[in-house]
Amino acid sequence: MSARIIERIIGPRIGPEETAGHALRYGAPGFLLLVARVLLLVSLFLPYWHMELQAPQYPSGLHMTAHLNHLSGDVAEIDGLNHYIGMRSLYEAAEIERDVGVFLMIAFVVLLELAAFVHSRWAVLLVLPVVLFPAVFLVDLHLWMRHFGLNLDPSAPLSNAIKPFVPTAIGRGGIGQFATIATPGLGLILATIASAVLIAALFFHRRAYMPLVKARSANAT
């Protein structure tokens, strides 16, 4: 890869005098990218999804929490109830996603570090996967729940009493005498805030560096 191509990818460099004279203009994108990185790192240690199962035999309800890399709470009890209607164990859902979740988040942080160094439109490609992550998380969650709910074991004890259904990923749902309440966890909320921060970062990034890119292109012709 030639030096010219590398220069076009990383964008124009800003000298110390120019940076000092326009600290807010050139500092805003990097600061917002830093905020997003911190939010993502904090979200690693927080739950991304909660589900409460309400049933007559459980006055206090059953509670399950999903982190990026593990499930916690009353998972065994919920699996026991789901067994009677023919639904597979919750531990079988999103196994690959849980295996790579932490590493994916670390990769996102690295991408944002690189984006802070890139002063061209290529920064969008580095930021976009992180911006889309919360939506992809919810879509993936919905698809897994849909798959489990629509593919019940016909040999289960209550298979004739329960028709295939799609569990609710966010909000209130239920089947038969059971009700579920699914809510986003604080980790997912922080990741969503990080996405909004990154959109703002891209706006300030474009405002700061696009004039320089255009000026460099004009001088090159």
Image (cartoon, rainbow, N blue to C red):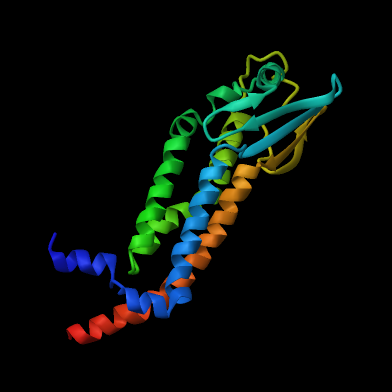
Q: Is residue 159 above or below residue 182?
A: above
Q: In this view, does 179 lie above or below 29?
A: above
Q: Is residue 53 above or below residue 194?
A: above
Q: Is residue 219 above or below residue 189?
A: below
Q: Is residue 163 visible from the viewing direction of this image?
A: no
Based on the displayed image, in which of its 4 quarters is residue 155 positioned? Answer: top right
Tag count: 0
Q: Quick one: quadrant of the C terminus?
A: bottom left
Residue placed most toward the observer, 166 or 128: 128
Residue at position x 47%, y 34% from top? 97
Residue at position x 63%, y 23% from top? 87
Q: Residue furthest left?
A: 2
Q: Name the spot of residue 114 as percent of width and height, x first.
A: 35, 56
Residue at position x 84%, y 25% from top? 60
**Does residue 2 appear to the left or right of 42 in the view shown?**
left
Based on the displayed image, in which of its 4 quarters is residue 151 positioned? Answer: top right
Q: Name the spot of residue 74 as percent of width and height, x first.
A: 70, 22
Q: Name the spot of residue 128 as percent of width and height, x first.
A: 43, 57
Q: Is residue 66 visible from the viewing direction of this image?
A: yes
Q: Name the spot of residue 135 as percent of width and height, x first.
A: 55, 50
Q: Quick one: quadrant of the N terminus?
A: bottom left
Residue at position x 59%, y 55% from top? 193
